[in-house]
Image (cartoon, helix red, strand yellow):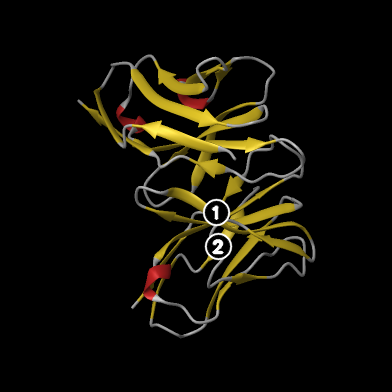
Amino acid sequence: EAQVTQNPRYLITVTGKKLTVTCSQNMNHEYMSWYRQDPGLGLRQIYYSMNVEVTDKGDVPEGYKVSRKEKRNFPLILESPSPNQTSLYFCASSPQGGGQPQHFGDGTRLSIL
Amino acid sequence: AQSVTQLGSHVSVSEGALVLLRCNYSSSVPPYLFWYVQYPNQGLQLLLKYTSAATLVKGINGFEAEFKKSETSFHLTKPSAHMSDAAEYFCAVSVSGGYNKLIFGAGTRLAVHP
């Protein structure tokens, strides 16, 4: 089954404790992206990657890091989480090229206390 | 720069009634337009997309949307609402050029009453 898998689905942690949210896709997609969803703001892009070893900032990259060492994986790293990063996070993937719909994971709800 | 405006953060309809969710976009180049649906505790699922092939686009679950360039709109409709349509709906725009970034609207939460 074609899917984007995120882990963990839920996490409560404390300010400053490094965490990683993993994302893996099994569709051999070149393009992967991270979004955060906040009430009244829709989804905003954090980082994206157009292929292995190629990553770039989205609209709200501050406080986040990513890496793309393998085509299937695109982890999101919060080196020193803060309460304003409490949000619902989605990983997405798609083939390269304009107009390609993105496939989304089920989301990770992060609470930073 | 591209942007998306969804009119109405909450829409409530009766079961069997017409569903109309409004979306207006801004883009300096021909856009690709999408509607996604989000059910509780799930990710976003593609309902339909416009990629310039036809202005009236049919999607899953009986939804359709019409691209109107003159009005810069891409409203989502369904003739008869079902209880299972209750969810949050997002309109999104992206542009051509191999860059797949999606710009999302703020979302519209649809409630369906018996």
Between A87 and B31, which is closer to the camera in this rendering?
B31
Callout 1: residue from which chain?
A
Q: Is residue A109 left or right of residue B51?
A: left
Q: Nearer the viewer, residue A11 or A37?
A: A37
Above or below for B40 versus A34: above
Q: Position of residue A6 (x, y in %)?
A: 55, 62
In the rendered image, which residue does mark 2 sit on? A6
Count of number-bearing discs: 2
Q: Amino acid at mark 1?
A: Gly
Q: Amino acid at mark 2?
A: Gln
Q: Earlier in the sequence, mark 1 or mark 2?
A: 2
Q: Farthest left residue?
A: B114
Q: Nearer the viewer, residue B33 or A75?
A: B33
| Callouts 1 and 2 close, C-beta under 8 Å | yes
Residue B40 visible in the shown view: yes
**SS type, badge 2:** strand
Q: Residue at x 40, y 43 (%)?
A: B39
Residue B84 bears which disc, if any?
none
Mark yes or no: residue B91 visible.
Answer: no
Distance Cα–Cα, label 1 vs label 2: 6 Å
Pinpoint the chain carrying mark 2.
A
* Above or below, comparing residue B69 to residue B35 in the picture: above
Query: Residue B18, image x and y in percent?
Result: 33, 16
Residue drawn at (49%, 69%) of the image? A8
Residue that carries the numbered disc 1 in the rendered image: A105
Please identify the quadrant where the N terminus of chain B is shown. Answer: top right
Determine whether A102 is above or below A57 in the image: above
Whole-percent x and y of residue B32?
A: 64, 30
Q: Residues within 10 Å of mark 1 (few under 14, many from 20)?
A: many
* Crowding near the residue tagged with mark 2, few <14, some 14–19, many ≥20 C-alpha atoms within 10 Å: many
> Residue at left 46%, top 20%?
B62
